[in-house]
Image (spheres, helix red, strand yellow):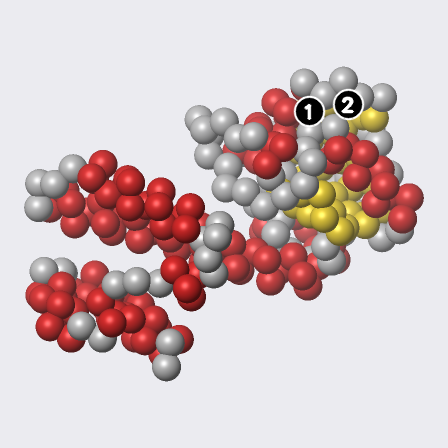
Protein backbone atom coordinates (compact mmCIF):
# COMPACT_ATOMS: atom_id res chain seq x y z
CA UNK A 1 0.00 0.00 0.00
CA UNK A 2 1.15 3.53 -0.80
CA UNK A 3 0.36 6.14 1.83
CA UNK A 4 -0.82 9.52 0.55
CA UNK A 5 -1.28 12.66 2.64
CA UNK A 6 -3.38 15.46 1.11
CA UNK A 7 -2.95 18.93 2.56
CA UNK A 8 -5.75 21.34 1.68
CA UNK A 9 -9.48 21.78 2.02
CA UNK A 10 -10.62 23.10 -1.35
CA UNK A 11 -12.22 21.47 -4.36
CA UNK A 12 -9.07 19.70 -5.61
CA UNK A 13 -8.24 18.30 -2.16
CA UNK A 14 -11.80 17.08 -1.66
CA UNK A 15 -12.07 15.34 -5.04
CA UNK A 16 -8.61 13.78 -4.70
CA UNK A 17 -9.37 12.49 -1.23
CA UNK A 18 -12.65 10.95 -2.40
CA UNK A 19 -11.11 9.14 -5.37
CA UNK A 20 -8.12 7.85 -3.36
CA UNK A 21 -10.49 6.48 -0.71
CA UNK A 22 -11.84 4.12 -3.39
CA UNK A 23 -8.40 3.01 -4.62
CA UNK A 24 -7.43 -0.44 -3.31
CA UNK A 25 -3.68 0.23 -3.33
CA UNK A 26 -3.78 3.63 -1.61
CA UNK A 27 -4.24 4.72 1.99
CA UNK A 28 -5.13 8.39 2.23
CA UNK A 29 -5.27 11.03 4.94
CA UNK A 30 -6.42 14.62 4.45
CA UNK A 31 -5.63 17.60 6.68
CA UNK A 32 -6.18 21.33 6.37
CA UNK A 33 -3.20 23.50 5.48
CA UNK A 34 -3.44 25.37 8.78
CA UNK A 35 -3.01 22.13 10.77
CA UNK A 36 0.72 21.65 10.14
CA UNK A 37 2.03 21.27 13.70
CA UNK A 38 1.95 17.46 13.63
CA UNK A 39 1.98 16.43 9.98
CA UNK A 40 1.46 12.67 9.51
CA UNK A 41 4.19 10.84 7.61
CA UNK A 42 3.36 9.49 4.14
CA UNK A 43 5.03 8.12 1.04
CA UNK A 44 3.65 11.06 -0.95
CA UNK A 45 2.45 14.39 0.43
CA UNK A 46 0.18 16.28 -1.98
CA UNK A 47 -0.23 20.03 -1.48
CA UNK A 48 -3.65 20.92 -2.86
CA UNK A 49 -3.43 24.56 -1.76
CA UNK A 50 -3.58 27.90 -3.57
CA UNK A 51 -0.61 28.80 -5.77
CA UNK A 52 0.41 31.61 -3.43
CA UNK A 53 0.55 29.21 -0.46
CA UNK A 54 2.74 26.50 -2.04
CA UNK A 55 6.09 27.95 -0.97
CA UNK A 56 5.07 28.67 2.61
CA UNK A 57 3.26 25.39 3.23
CA UNK A 58 5.91 23.23 1.59
CA UNK A 59 8.66 24.85 3.69
CA UNK A 60 6.99 23.39 6.79
CA UNK A 61 6.84 19.78 5.49
CA UNK A 62 9.58 17.23 6.18
CA UNK A 63 7.99 14.20 4.50
CA UNK A 64 10.16 12.43 1.92
CA UNK A 65 8.28 13.35 -1.27
CA UNK A 66 6.21 16.52 -1.50
CA UNK A 67 4.26 17.47 -4.65
CA UNK A 68 1.92 20.30 -5.58
CA UNK A 69 -1.13 20.22 -7.85
CA UNK A 70 -0.73 23.58 -9.59
CA UNK A 71 -0.68 24.03 -13.34
CA UNK A 72 0.85 27.50 -13.18
CA UNK A 73 3.68 26.92 -10.70
CA UNK A 74 7.09 25.38 -11.33
CA UNK A 75 8.41 22.46 -9.31
CA UNK A 76 10.90 24.96 -7.87
CA UNK A 77 8.05 26.69 -5.98
CA UNK A 78 8.28 23.80 -3.50
CA UNK A 79 10.57 24.85 -0.63
CA UNK A 80 10.77 21.57 1.30
CA UNK A 81 14.29 20.24 1.74
CA UNK A 82 13.26 16.72 0.70
CA UNK A 83 12.28 15.36 -2.74
CA UNK A 84 9.85 17.28 -4.97
CA UNK A 85 7.32 16.66 -7.70
CA UNK A 86 4.07 17.75 -9.35
CA UNK A 87 0.72 15.97 -9.60
CA UNK A 88 -1.37 18.24 -11.85
CA UNK A 89 -4.84 17.23 -12.99
CA UNK A 90 -5.99 19.09 -16.09
CA UNK A 91 -9.61 19.61 -15.14
CA UNK A 92 -11.92 22.19 -13.59
CA UNK A 93 -13.11 21.03 -10.17
CA UNK A 94 -16.32 22.34 -8.63
CA UNK A 95 -17.48 21.41 -5.14
CA UNK A 96 -20.76 19.68 -5.95
CA UNK A 97 -19.95 18.35 -9.43
CA UNK A 98 -18.58 14.81 -9.67
CA UNK A 99 -15.77 14.15 -12.13
CA UNK A 100 -14.64 10.99 -13.89
CA UNK A 101 -10.94 10.63 -13.11
CA UNK A 102 -10.49 8.06 -15.88
CA UNK A 103 -11.09 10.92 -18.35
CA UNK A 104 -8.82 13.46 -16.67
CA UNK A 105 -5.26 14.02 -17.98
CA UNK A 106 -2.84 13.71 -15.05
CA UNK A 107 0.44 15.53 -15.66
CA UNK A 108 3.40 14.31 -13.61
CA UNK A 109 6.85 15.71 -12.89
CA UNK A 110 9.55 14.54 -10.50
CA UNK A 111 13.23 15.15 -9.84
CA UNK A 112 14.19 11.52 -10.51
CA UNK A 113 12.81 8.41 -12.24
CA UNK A 114 12.09 6.55 -8.99
CA UNK A 115 9.82 9.33 -7.73
CA UNK A 116 8.21 9.68 -11.15
CA UNK A 117 7.28 5.98 -11.15
CA UNK A 118 5.85 6.35 -7.63
CA UNK A 119 3.65 9.24 -8.80
CA UNK A 120 2.75 7.23 -11.89
CA UNK A 121 1.63 4.32 -9.69
CA UNK A 122 -0.82 6.41 -7.67
CA UNK A 123 -2.01 8.13 -10.87
CA UNK A 124 -2.74 4.72 -12.43
CA UNK A 125 -4.76 3.80 -9.34
CA UNK A 126 -7.27 6.54 -10.15
CA UNK A 127 -6.90 7.35 -13.86
CA UNK A 128 -5.70 6.24 -17.29
CA UNK A 129 -4.57 9.44 -19.06
CA UNK A 130 -1.09 10.02 -17.65
CA UNK A 131 1.54 12.35 -19.13
CA UNK A 132 5.15 13.21 -18.28
CA UNK A 133 5.13 17.01 -18.42
CA UNK A 134 7.85 19.40 -17.28
CA UNK A 135 7.24 22.76 -15.58
CA UNK A 136 7.50 24.90 -18.73
CA UNK A 137 5.15 22.63 -20.68
CA UNK A 138 2.69 22.63 -17.79
CA UNK A 139 2.61 26.43 -17.63
CA UNK A 140 1.80 26.48 -21.35
CA UNK A 141 -0.96 23.92 -20.91
CA UNK A 142 -2.38 25.92 -18.01
CA UNK A 143 -2.65 29.20 -19.92
CA UNK A 144 -4.27 27.35 -22.83
CA UNK A 145 -6.71 25.81 -20.34
CA UNK A 146 -7.62 29.27 -19.04
CA UNK A 147 -8.65 30.24 -22.57
CA UNK A 148 -10.72 27.13 -23.31
CA UNK A 149 -12.26 26.79 -19.83
CA UNK A 150 -12.24 29.90 -17.64
CA UNK A 151 -12.63 32.47 -20.39
CA UNK A 152 -15.19 30.34 -22.23
CA UNK A 153 -17.21 29.93 -19.05
CA UNK A 154 -17.15 33.70 -18.57
CA UNK A 155 -18.60 34.06 -22.08
CA UNK A 156 -21.35 31.62 -21.04
CA UNK A 157 -22.00 33.94 -18.09
CA UNK A 158 -22.31 36.94 -20.42
CA UNK A 159 -24.65 34.96 -22.68
CA UNK A 160 -26.75 34.10 -19.63
CA UNK A 161 -26.84 37.78 -18.59
CA UNK A 162 -28.04 38.80 -22.07
CA UNK A 163 -30.75 36.15 -21.97
CA UNK A 164 -31.92 37.19 -18.49
CA UNK A 165 -32.04 40.87 -19.47
CA UNK A 166 -34.26 40.02 -22.42
CA UNK A 167 -36.39 37.40 -20.63
CA UNK A 168 -35.14 34.50 -22.71
CA UNK A 169 -34.29 31.13 -21.08
CA UNK A 170 -30.55 30.37 -21.15
CA UNK A 171 -31.46 26.70 -21.76
CA UNK A 172 -32.26 27.61 -25.36
CA UNK A 173 -28.48 27.92 -25.96
CA UNK A 174 -27.57 24.54 -24.47
CA UNK A 175 -27.79 22.54 -27.74
CA UNK A 176 -25.57 25.13 -29.45
CA UNK A 177 -23.00 24.97 -26.65
CA UNK A 178 -22.91 21.17 -26.84
CA UNK A 179 -22.57 21.16 -30.63
CA UNK A 180 -19.72 23.70 -30.45
CA UNK A 181 -17.76 21.40 -28.14
CA UNK A 182 -18.57 18.21 -30.07
CA UNK A 183 -17.60 19.78 -33.38
CA UNK A 184 -13.95 20.25 -32.42
CA UNK A 185 -13.60 16.50 -31.87
CA UNK A 186 -13.59 16.11 -35.67
CA UNK A 187 -12.63 19.60 -36.90
CA UNK A 188 -9.87 21.99 -35.88
CA UNK A 189 -11.12 25.11 -34.08
CA UNK A 190 -10.23 27.16 -37.16
CA UNK A 191 -12.30 24.87 -39.41
CA UNK A 192 -15.23 24.98 -36.97
CA UNK A 193 -15.36 28.79 -36.75
CA UNK A 194 -18.65 30.32 -37.91
CA UNK A 195 -20.50 33.56 -37.26
CA UNK A 196 -20.69 37.18 -38.42
CA UNK A 197 -17.04 37.98 -37.60
CA UNK A 198 -15.56 35.40 -39.96
CA UNK A 199 -18.15 36.32 -42.64
CA UNK A 200 -17.42 40.04 -42.18
CA UNK A 201 -21.13 40.75 -41.78
CA UNK A 202 -20.69 44.40 -40.78
CA UNK A 203 -24.38 45.22 -40.42
CA UNK A 204 -25.01 42.22 -38.17
CA UNK A 205 -21.99 43.12 -36.04
CA UNK A 206 -23.28 46.71 -35.69
CA UNK A 207 -26.75 45.45 -34.77
CA UNK A 208 -25.27 43.17 -32.11
CA UNK A 209 -23.21 46.00 -30.61
CA UNK A 210 -26.33 48.17 -30.35
CA UNK A 211 -27.94 45.49 -28.14
CA UNK A 212 -25.08 45.29 -25.65
CA UNK A 213 -23.90 47.30 -22.67
CA UNK A 214 -20.49 49.02 -22.72
CA UNK A 215 -18.54 46.15 -21.16
CA UNK A 216 -20.19 43.58 -23.43
CA UNK A 217 -19.48 45.77 -26.48
CA UNK A 218 -15.79 45.92 -25.60
CA UNK A 219 -15.51 42.13 -25.28
CA UNK A 220 -17.55 41.57 -28.45
CA UNK A 221 -15.35 43.96 -30.43
CA UNK A 222 -12.08 42.44 -29.18
CA UNK A 223 -13.21 38.89 -30.01
CA UNK A 224 -14.59 39.94 -33.39
CA UNK A 225 -11.29 41.57 -34.34
CA UNK A 226 -9.34 38.54 -33.09
CA UNK A 227 -11.42 36.17 -35.22
CA UNK A 228 -11.00 38.35 -38.28
CA UNK A 229 -7.24 38.73 -37.76
CA UNK A 230 -6.83 34.98 -37.32
CA UNK A 231 -8.44 34.31 -40.67
CA UNK A 232 -6.75 37.00 -42.76
Question: Measuring 16% from the left and 69% from the top, which residue is drawn there?
Answer: 205
Question: Callout 1: few (<14), some (14-19), or many (20+) C-alpha neighbours within 10 Å?
Answer: some
Q: Which residue is situated farthest in the right direction here?
A: 114
The residue depicted at 35 percent of the width and 63 percent of the height is 193
| Label 1 with label 2: CB-CB less than 8 Å | yes
Res 135 seen here: yes
Q: Name which quarter of the figure residue 171 lies in.
A: top left
Measured from the top left, where is residue 72 in percent x and y?
60, 56
In the figure, residue 160 lies in which quadrant? top left
Counting from the top left corner in percent of width and height, residue 163 is at 15, 45
Which of pointers 1 and 2 lies earlier in the amino acid sequence? 1
Q: Nearer the viewer, residue 29 or 109?
A: 109
> Which mark is drawn over residue 20?
1
Mark on residue 99? none
Residue picked out by circle 2: 26
Considering every residue shown, the one lying at the far front of the view is 186
For the C terminus, the image quarter is bottom left
Q: Is residue 116 above or below residue 32?
A: below
Q: Residue 171, relative to residue 224: is it above or below?
A: above
Amino acid sequence: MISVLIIGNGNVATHLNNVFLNADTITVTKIKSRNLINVPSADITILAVSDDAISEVSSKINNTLVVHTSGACSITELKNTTRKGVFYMLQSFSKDKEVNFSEIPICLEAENEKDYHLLETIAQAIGTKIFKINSEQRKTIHVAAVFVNNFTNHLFKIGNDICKTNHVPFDILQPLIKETVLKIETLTPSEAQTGPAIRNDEQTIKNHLDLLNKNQQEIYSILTKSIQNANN
